[in-house]
Image: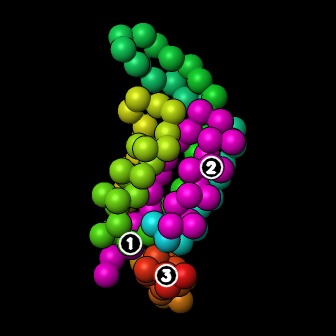
Amino acid sequence: MSTVLIYMTAGSYQEAERIGKALVQSSLAACINILDPMHSLFWWQNEFQSEQETVLLAKTRADLVDSLTARVRELHSYDCPCVVALPICGGNPEFIAWIQSETQDRQE
């Protein structure tokens, strides 16, 4: 089963932490890293934007990307949140195995 790194942005550290916590607690992500602050330059609705944002990096299984994206869309304040998946093509095998094990369904 393949693993991916999900790159996301949020409008604040608090929002990023709330989203990240929900993803890890539901086993949609094994781990979330939050990087704050980050400065974004972009066009939105025909206007140039310059905003401070927060980055979330999630490690998960490729087959969970759609579910993770749907959950982020439910929780996010943006109309069109940034959620992109990048394949993990190598690395520490033990860490990759840990990602796999932490994103399995948990028996509560």
- Magenta highlight on residue 10: yes
Amino acid type of disc 2? Arg
User: Which circle marks residue 61 in the picture?
Assistant: 1
For the C terminus, the quadrant is: bottom right
- Camera sees residue 79: yes
Eye-nearest disc, 3 or 2: 3
Mark 1 falls on what kind of element?
strand
Q: How far apart are marks 2 and 1 (CA)?
A: 21 Å
Q: Earlier in the sequence, mark 2 or mark 1?
A: 2
The range drawn in magenta is 1-26
Q: Distance between the residues labelled 1 and 3?
A: 15 Å
Residue 52 at what x, y percent from top left? 63, 28
Identify the disc placed on residue 22.
none
Measured along the vertical axis of the image, is residue 90 above or below residue 9? below
Type of amino acid at the residue the image marks with label 3:
Arg
Q: Mark 2 points at which residue?
A: 18
